[in-house]
Amino acid sequence: MKVGIPRGLLFYRFYALWKTFLEELGAEVVTSPPTNKNIIQQGLTYAVEEICFPAKVFLGHALYLKDRVDLLFIPRVVSFHRKEYNCPKILALPDLARNLFSIPGERIIDDEINMREEGMRGWQKGFLNIGKHFTTKESKIMKALQLAEKAYKEYQTNLKQGILPEDLIDHKNPLPLRERKIVLLGHTYLLSDSYINMNIAKKVNDLNYSVITPDMVEEEKKRYYLSTIPKPSFWTISNEIIGSALYHLKERKAEVRGFIHLVSFECGPDSLVGELIERLLKREKESLPYLRLEIDEHTGEAGLVTRLEAFVDMMEWRYKNIESHVSSFASS
Amino acid sequence: MKATFPHLLHLDIALGVLYPALGVEIITPPPITQKTIEIGVKLAPQNACFPLKVTLANFIEGIELGADTIFMAGGVGPCRFGYYGQIQRIILEDLGYNVNFVLLDHPRYGIRPFIRALQAMAGGRVLSSRVIKVASLAWKILRFSEELETERRALRAQVKNRQQLDEIVEGALEQLRQVNNGESLQAIQEATRKKLNSLERKEIEDLIKVGIVGEIYIAQETKINFNVEKILGDLGAYVHNSVSTVEYVLHTLPFTHSQEKLEAWKLAKPYLKRFVGGEGIDTVGSTIRYAQQGFDGVIHLYPFTCMPEVVAKSILTTVSKDYDLPILHLAIDEHSGEAGLVTRVEAFVDVLERRKKLNKRKLEVS
């Protein structure tokens, strides 16, 4: 049976897990190609105009796969962390695809994965239900899940090393490591799709900086620093962004020179969380420069490059001035 | 302590009865005006949803009148509303306002802070017989204020003298502010119902019926949504609004539920399988209910970029096709202009009238 995984949204987080799981159950896994103009066009045609850009891109991918596979794999990932949620658009993702493309319900695997109340039990229940599309044997499903989780751990370990999801998935050569770093904040699906983010990691790399994404920060660190604010948000991915921003702020490493927050224009969580991060950074006595870049289907590459270059210039100027100030102070 | 709170339609009437009776001094923020909106837009994050901006401005206008405490509700998501309080507090802090922000959050975030907030909002003890008595009176007032608006929406197109209708409703709302016991409330209720019933009606053939669905704040707050229901009524449409604070509270409290909402959720199931935050699923369900009740069209009101409502909008395209029901989506934010909105609503009503005539002719022919 051919099962299609659209390359968008949570794909970049769970690809290794989903692929292994489905293949262990005997499915032939098909993924849509990296985002291209055509896929975006399709997404824009079908989606309502106000939904966020990554969701439109996702729908474009789903449409690409629709007639090429037997089953579309769009699980309803309500939550992958206790007491937290994903955003409403991710909660409704299978319904969006079903309604917008008029796909019969039985052609979409839309079982719910929900760790909000039940934690790991909710996770296992979800995968058990997904597995039942392929086999009735529970033991076989649980074994597939174990192998899948192993693949997922390995994938995460690789991400921690600083490899970008896209390079791992498509076996591309990673970018050369630079000595100086910029913290690149944002949702994995925005940071990982180099077509929609106009290859920002490469552009930063060309300016002689490496990026550090939230994926590259230890889970415990992110959670610890998240717990230092009065009330964390209820969106897991946004919480990870807050956690890694605070981690880099409080445990400052000399090579980290600034923050870039990449957000999609209509992203609900980031409209609030971005503000929170910006204000927390500003409150810090000796803070680092912060740039928020908004992206949607109308963003022009030239504008983005200009802002990026201006930001890096400012960052370097500021760094040098603060350095010289400090040294002169020390010598006197 | 002088507390202020956000506006939401006639919430201030009920709270204005509740708090003085509890011995809590309150400062009702001034009515929402263009200036309120400007304050909110200037200070709130650019891409935040509109209700955050307006309620933030309510607080600031309340503080300027002397408030030192803010009462606000929180939530558990996934809609942004649950995080408003946190963002608003940090903005007020950065602006240098020294106020006590009392945030009534879900008990999920700790039962102690929940009870402490509730205590602060109830002026001391939570469960004294007096608190319960006053709270139930305030609740009845809130209910009746919504009932008045329901009547006004339904009657506007049908009565001969609309000004008289407005006078009765506004008069009753003013009187509600003075209520201090169950008897005086009942007297107002009876007198108002009598007056409304005695209003002279027009004979209308083929009355157009329009339902309103959407997000709780924008769909109800007539000062923000350009009073769409009045525009519709003036154009000769019978209007019903599915969004209600009473139903919302009933559904949020742990031991009660809203029958209306449960019913809507059930109707929405074939299209949207689960709750997606805010009123997303209610919007879908209520639209289907309007279709089944023979309404001629539905107006969907929501803040621009509202996540649950954008999901609902995506799904309503299918509902609209399946039930052959025209839906007008109106996203509201600080950039919305009245003239553009009125034109769209007028055109929509024209479409509904024409459709009604055509359908009737078709029936007559067959």
Image: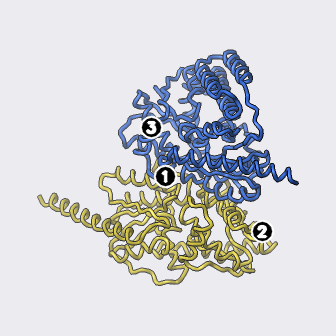
Chain colours: A yellow, B blue
* SS for callout 3: helix
Q: Is residue B25 above or below residue B309?
A: above
Q: Where is the C terminus of chain A found, in terms of image quarters?
A: bottom left
| Three-letter amino acid code of the residue under disc 3 | Thr
How far apart marks 1 and 3 lie (CA) works out to 34 Å
**N-terminal of the two: label 1 or label 2?**
2
- Nearest the viewer among A2 and B304 is B304
Which circle, 1 or 2, is nearer the viewer? Answer: 2
Q: Which residue is mark 3?
A: B36
Which circle, 1 or 3, is nearer the viewer? Answer: 3
Residue at 74% in and 40% down: B207
Q: Chain of mark 1?
A: A
- Nearest the viewer among A149 and A174 is A174
Residue at 46% in and 26% down: B2
Q: Which residue is mark 2?
A: A106
Percent x, y for residue B240?
Answer: 70, 39
Q: Pointer 3: residues within 10 angstroms few (<14), some, or many (20+)?
A: many
Q: Chain of mark 2?
A: A
Percent x, y for residue A161?
Answer: 46, 75
- Nearest the viewer among B144 and B107 is B144
Which circle, 3 or 2, is nearer the viewer? Answer: 3
| Three-letter amino acid code of the residue under disc 2 | Glu
- Check chain identity for marks 1 and 3: say if they share one: no
Percent x, y for residue A164?
Answer: 48, 75
**Residue B328 visible in the displayed image:** yes
| Three-letter amino acid code of the residue under disc 1 | Ser
Q: Where is the N terminus of chain A found, in terms of image quarters?
A: bottom right
* SS for callout 1: loop
Q: Which residue is mark 1?
A: A227
